[in-house]
Image (tube, rainbow, N blue to C red):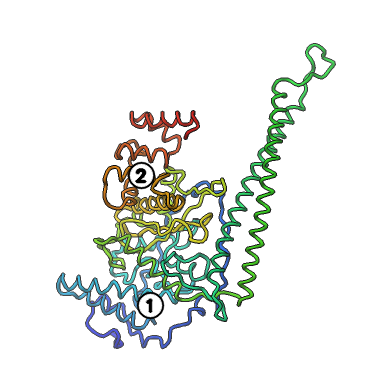
Amino acid sequence: MSPMSDKYSGDMDPEIAALLQADGPPSPSTPKFEDLFTGPRVEKQAPPAMDFSKAAFTPVRVFTQTPKPYFDNPSYYKIVLAEMGDTAARVHKVLTDLMNAPDPETRGQNRLRFIPAWWDFLEALVRTLTPSMPEPKRLAVRYGVLLPTLLSPEQKTNLSSIIFENNTGETIHYVDEWLQKVGSGEVAPLATDEEIRVTKKGGVDNSALLQKIEKLQGQTQAQTNLINVKTLEMNDIEDAMIRAAGQVRIHDKNPNFPQLQDNLNGTQRGSLTLIQDCLKRLSGLDKEVDLYYRDLEKMTAELRAAEARVNESGGAATVDARVVVRELGSIRQMAKISVGRQGNHFPVVMKQYLPPRLEDIATRENVLNTMAEVERLDPGLFLRNFKNTTNRISPHVILIPSFGEVGLCWEPFEKYNRSTSRGRIAIPMYSKNLKNAVLTALGDLRWQVVKEKAGYRWMEEGLTGWYYQWFTDRGLRGDVKESFVQDYILWITKESEGTQKLDKDVRGIFWRNTPFPTEIRETLRNRGFVYNELYKKDVNRSMSDGY
């Protein structure tokens, strides 16, 4: 065996020793963050225009790729730790101590020591996160694979069969992808109590101005979508007028005087009435759209003025390394929440904890497929109203390489763009029940969106208000949101199939505020008296316009 450097001295497990060769001294200096993100600095880009026309997720057709030889590289472990200095030395030593622990108590102590050591190592590693990062380092961030020999051959095949690139077009991100988007300014960082102030070259603080730009960008996107919706409605009315006019122009011969053209029949007179109604509606919509265009012109002018002020104050924004490091801190908090106090907080994958089947791992494709299934049962899940127009806005999903049991909603929408921004939810990749992990995140999102929109009246009105009143009337204790999320899971998994698991009043709250699609309600009404009564109430409300 080659002589080991001092930082890797000491006894070690033979498997680790076989993989690890002399690394040489650590890099004398950490590369500058600006030089690693493809260029000296990155301009804060406007977020890509959101597509409000999609009514649902595109079905996933391909879930896996041909297994890649990611973990066959005998230098994998060495490459992960290479050039990472003291943080790599610490990870290596604690892992070696863990592998050589003589008893369960020592092994447990070393496990606890390894957790902060790994997160410190990741903090150093994400500073060098670039598209050209060595594959093993990226896989360590994305999947939590530090040492391939900690996995079984089947598990290595599973992980290497996960599709690496995002071919779905949806906003579902592995951790390395998310950090890179945040670092490049493509997406805003996760909300935290303490905000990082973004400065321009020359030291001018433009944080408030950049936040204003973010908000204006969201407003212009929403206003543009509103105009599109109204103009499409105008097009439909115009088409209806053309069809009606075509019917009016068709004339038969008079039955009593065949040599003469007959006058309008009853259907044609109805077409004239329709045309008159269409003209009134078209005129009203035209006035609306004219006002919307004026508002859009004002928003666009204000946005351009704000962008000009940013450019005048010093040009492109410098992306601070603290943004990415702090983002990793938020992701660490997400991992802790998803695991829970009594869960498995060990931050790298090991064969005894990894789900045996690829179908049970929260890959991008598996999560997207599960979310599509939930949205099918809860069609209003991603719908949000803006100026009397309903938009479908699916959230950003961050896939965290942890052994967590629950997903979570970090924020229902961005702080400075409530109208069109995406929420942010996190889902642990390695859970015992993938569907439950996704459902807890979506249930959390459901609750928080309604609560934030209701503001200080969240305990009095809407979905959260009705549920909170039921919760307090029953004298229940604990977190009302957690109770809601668990009931939401039962609503989607059990009640949708006609299995009655919820309290009667809670079932009524969900039936009215998170209704199943019509075809499922039609089916359920025949599955029992309870659902039939709820269906009858729907009919009565619709007849009285009280729904």
How many neighbours does mark 1 have within 10 angstroms: few (below 14), some (14-19), or many (20 or more)?
Answer: some
The amino acid type of the residue labelled 2 equals Tyr
Q: Position of residue 294 (x, y in %)?
A: 68, 53
When the figure is inspected, residue 56 is found, relative to residue 302, above or below; the finding is above
Which label belongs to residue 467?
2
Q: Which numbered disc flags the more N-terminal residue, 2 or 1?
A: 1
Query: For this rendering, which residue is in front, 450 or 51?
Result: 450
Whether residue 69 appears in this view of the structure is no
The quarter of the picture where the N terminus appears is bottom left
Q: Position of residue 324 (x, y in %)?
A: 44, 72
**Judging from the image, what secondary structure is the residue with disc 1 in?**
helix
**Front position among marks 2 and 1:** 2
- Cα–Cα gap, marks 2 and 1: 52 Å
> What residue do we see at 65% from left, 67% from top?
305
From the image, tell me which residue sits under label 1: 79
When the figure is inspected, residue 430 is found, relative to residue 83, above or below; the finding is above
Please tell me in which quadrant of the rendered image residue 239 appears. Answer: top right
Q: Position of residue 99 (x, y in %)?
A: 22, 74
Q: Would residue 117 be found to the left or right of residue 199 on screen?
A: left
The amino acid type of the residue labelled 1 equals Ile
**Judging from the image, what secondary structure is the residue with disc 2 in?**
helix
Q: Are marks 2 and 1 in contact (CB under 8 Å)?
A: no
Farthest-out residue, top: 256
Whether residue 242 appears in this view of the structure is yes
